[in-house]
Image (cartoon, coloured by chain):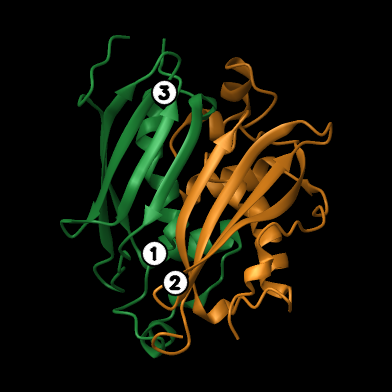
Chain colours: A green, B orange
């Protein structure tokens, strides 16, 4: 497959609801109540119930996995948590992922992810090194 | 309580074996909104050359969690959980986790830094399979907020 730097390889929008957060809490074992209780979130000064950072990280790589065709092609994946994703009880939240080719190396490709909610990026230095699809 | 600067270099005991279940992989895959059939359908995973369903890339956090719990429970570490914010996360893979794997992890604190009253603790958890072969290293940087201004 011929790739060039800057090329968008995948793009997707995810609708998160409180249900998504409860499901992730159960699947991951992270039961910090700031991810499902408004009163607890407010008591520690948060603007609302937040998505788990690891949920955002987990979904942000999925469009890349689908492009690659196999999770085994992801060699390295890193993010910095820069801004929380507030998930409203009624409205939820929408997270947008755009995956672009950041660099082409001899045996791998660096994919740079732009992950945003309400028009602001929520992850910094979100990068995956991948073995590109044949 | 503040983070013990002597923590750097500390290595914690190997965690108890974690047996990766097929339904756990599928549950986790659904939770991170994965759509890859390789994570959901054992037949599709086998057809692609894997022994069973393939865990999504961030699944190692489930095994890493047991190592971070050791850090938070260490009275000498001085890491107050109520002040911890997850700063960075990284995974370096030798191979993906698949259902049936029996995994253990050893965590090493690789760096402790002070920055503007906060502490940054970086810990690497090396996850290996039952044969002792490397599967993935999970690296977290935790930001521990200071108790007072300039503390």
Question: Residue shown at 77%/30% (left/top)?
Answer: B133
Question: Residue shown at 67%/28% (left/top)?
Answer: B52
Screen quadrant of the N terminus of chain A: top left
Position of residue B51 measured from the top left corner of the image (x, y, whole percent): 70, 24
Tag 3 secondary structure: helix
The tag on residue A51 is 1
Position of residue B116 measured from the top left corner of the image (x, y, whole percent): 39, 75
Could you give the CA–CA distance between mark 1 and mark 2, rounded to whole angstroms?
6 Å
| Residue at the disc numbered 3 | A68
Nearer-the-camera pick, B31 or B16: B16
The crowding category of the residue bearing disc 1, from other C-alpha atoms within 10 Å (few below 14, some 14 to 19, many at least 20), is: many
Position of residue A23 measured from the top left corner of the image (x, y, whole percent): 50, 60
- If you read the primary sequence from the N terminus, does the residue marked by circle 1 or circle 3 appear first? 1
The tag on residue A114 is none
| Residue at the disc numbered 2 | A35
Q: Quadrant of residue A89?
A: bottom left
The reply to whether discs 2 and 3 touch (Cβ–Cβ < 8 Å) is no
């Amino acid at each position: 497959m011929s790739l060039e730097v800057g090329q968008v390889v995948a793009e997707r929008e995810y609708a998160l609801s409180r249900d998504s957060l409860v499901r992730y809490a159960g699947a991951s074992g992270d039961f910090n109540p700031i991810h499902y209780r408004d009163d607890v979130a407010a008591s520690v000064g948060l603007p609302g119930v937040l998505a788990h950072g690891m949920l955002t990280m987990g979904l942000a790589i999925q469009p890349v996995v689908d492009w690659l065709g196999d999770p085994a092609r992801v060699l390295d994946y890193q993010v910095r948590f820069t801004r929380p994703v507030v998930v409203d009880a009624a409205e939820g939240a929408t997270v947008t992922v755009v995956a672009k080719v950041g660099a082409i190396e001899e045996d791998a490709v660096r994919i740079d992810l732009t992950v945003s909610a309400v028009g602001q990026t929520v992850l910094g230095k979100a990068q995956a090194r991948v073995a590109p699809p044949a | 309580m503040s983070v013990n600067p002597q923590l750097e270099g500390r290595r914690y005991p190997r965690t108890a074996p974690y047996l990766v279940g097929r339904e756990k992989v599928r549950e986790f895959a659904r939770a991170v909104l994965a759509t890859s059939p390789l994570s959901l359908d054992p037949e599709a995973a086998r057809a692609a050359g894997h022994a069973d369903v393939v865990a999504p890339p961030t699944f190692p956090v489930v095994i890493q969690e047991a190592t971070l719990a050791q850090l938070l429970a260490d009275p000498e570490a001085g890491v107050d959980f109520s002040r911890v914010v997850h700063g960075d996360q990284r995974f370096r893979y030798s191979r993906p986790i698949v259902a049936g794997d029996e995994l253990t992890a050893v965590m090493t604190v690789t760096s402790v830094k002070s920055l503007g009253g906060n502490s940054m603790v970086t810990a690497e958890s090396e996850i290996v399979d039952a044969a002792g072969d490397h599967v993935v290293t999970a690296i977290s940087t935790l930001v521990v907020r200071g108790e007072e201004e300039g503390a």
